[in-house]
Amino acid sequence: MSAKPKFEEPSSDASSDMPDELSPRHIGRRLVELVLLAVAVGVAISALPGLGSLRHRFAQADAAFIVLAGLLKLASSLSNIVAFREVFCPRLGWRFSYQLGMAEQATNVLLPTGGAGGLALGAWALRRGGLSLEYIARRSVAFFVITSAPNFLCAAIVGPLLMLHVLPGHAPLVPTAVFTGLAIGTMVFAAILPLVVDRIRPRHPKSRLGRTLNSGLTSLANGIRDTGELLRPKHIRVILGAIGYLAFDIGAFAAAFAAFGSTPPLGVIVFGYTIGQLGGLIPLPGGIGGTDGGLIGAMVLYGVSLPPAVAAVVVYRTFQLGVPAILGAIAFVQLRRTLQRSAEPTNLCAPLAEPPAQSPRDDPISGDLVG
């Protein structure tokens, strides 16, 4: 019989065990820096010579589509919270799920950690409620895979349709084939990764490094196996949340183009979006520079002229960064207040976090989903 998880009494100060990079002062400074950057971009667009065409486009923009882009980005952020709650703990109240999920998204925008900052914040908050690090680690892997999978799936489907001219739009053959192949290869690699890990991980590590490696690889494999279980129809909220997170975000991207009266074909929008977002893997705050350049470059590569691509990406990125940063910063303050009062919101999840059952083989990786 597996042992029950050990619980820790919540500390009296919600920030007592918080990593320094997640401190309110650090998050606040990053938010101010993001606001100042936005102001600087606005001043540059309005004042620098040579940007007259861009200024004209903004002056002629359809305000209704710009508002729509913001609303769709909000819907995307809320969909992410739906998936987050179902992956980590369906017993969490929606209010607390919103606080934690939105605060995670703000952390991803404000910290130059390539998305790891949000996971660290979630681990801190859930750990305060007594959840085991093993459970948090494996579900963090599952959540990352589930929210990333629709991007790769879209690239794998839309790419061939563009190359075969089933979908309209300019599609250079070699780049499209390469990106499609990478998307398919990544999905296949993720599917077989647990089997690979089961073969290479140290069985009876004696050193501290070996034990750490063993634990990390085990969580990685278990998280991917949890993904398969979480994507079954009985967890429909996970599926709807992950689809909504991507679909509404692409909708915001398309609305940003529509605001300037130059919407590319749907296939180009979807494929350009999915490969352009790869720039966000560069560990910069909010992917600033990497994502922007990736999206603009991808859209130009697929036949969109530079001026409308720049204008649309500026609008889209304003909402992609601004919505989670502003709402998430507010949610972060609310989250700390909630946890200062009690760790009870996450204590509800503790029964889900029992250690996974082990199979008869020598300390294998279990793929069972508990709870």
Image (spheres, rainbow, N blue to C red):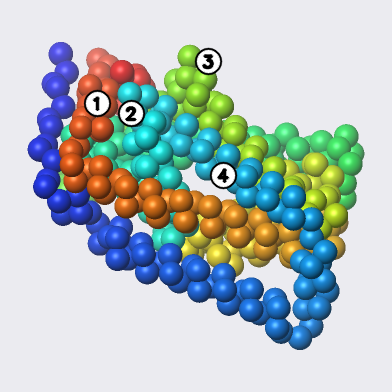
Kindly report which numbered mark, 2 or 3, lies closer to the viewer in this rendering: 2
* 3D distance between C-alphas at marks 1 and 3: 24 Å
Could you tell me which secondary element the residue under label 3 belongs to? helix
Q: Earlier in the sequence, mark 1 or mark 4?
A: 4
Label 2: which residue?
A: 92
Where on the picture, by quarter, is residue 101?
A: top left
* 3D distance between C-alphas at marks 2 and 3: 20 Å
Q: Residue at x 81, y 58 (%)?
A: 260
Asked whether, in this view, residue 139 is left or right of residue 71, the answer is left
Residue 275 on image: x %, y %: 67, 50
Q: Nearer the viewer, residue 26 or 352?
A: 26
Q: Nearer the viewer, residue 150 or 53?
A: 53
Label 3: which residue?
A: 233
Residue 274 on image: x %, y %: 66, 47
Tag 1: residue type? Answer: Leu
- The single residue placed furthest to the bottom in the displayed view is 49
Q: Earlier in the sequence, mark 2 or mark 3?
A: 2
* 3D distance between C-alphas at marks 1 and 4: 28 Å
Could you tell me which secondary element the residue under label 2 belongs to? loop
Q: Earlier in the sequence, mark 3 or mark 4?
A: 4
Label 3 environment density (alpha carbons within 10 Å; few <14, some 14–19, many ≥20): few
Asked whether, in this view, residue 189 is left or right of residue 178, the answer is left
Mark sitting on residue 74: 4
Q: Earlier in the sequence, mark 1 or mark 3?
A: 3
* 3D distance between C-alphas at marks 3 and 4: 25 Å
Where on the picture, by quarter, is residue 345?
A: top left
Q: Residue at x 84, y 45 (%)?
A: 265
Tag 4: residue type? Answer: Leu
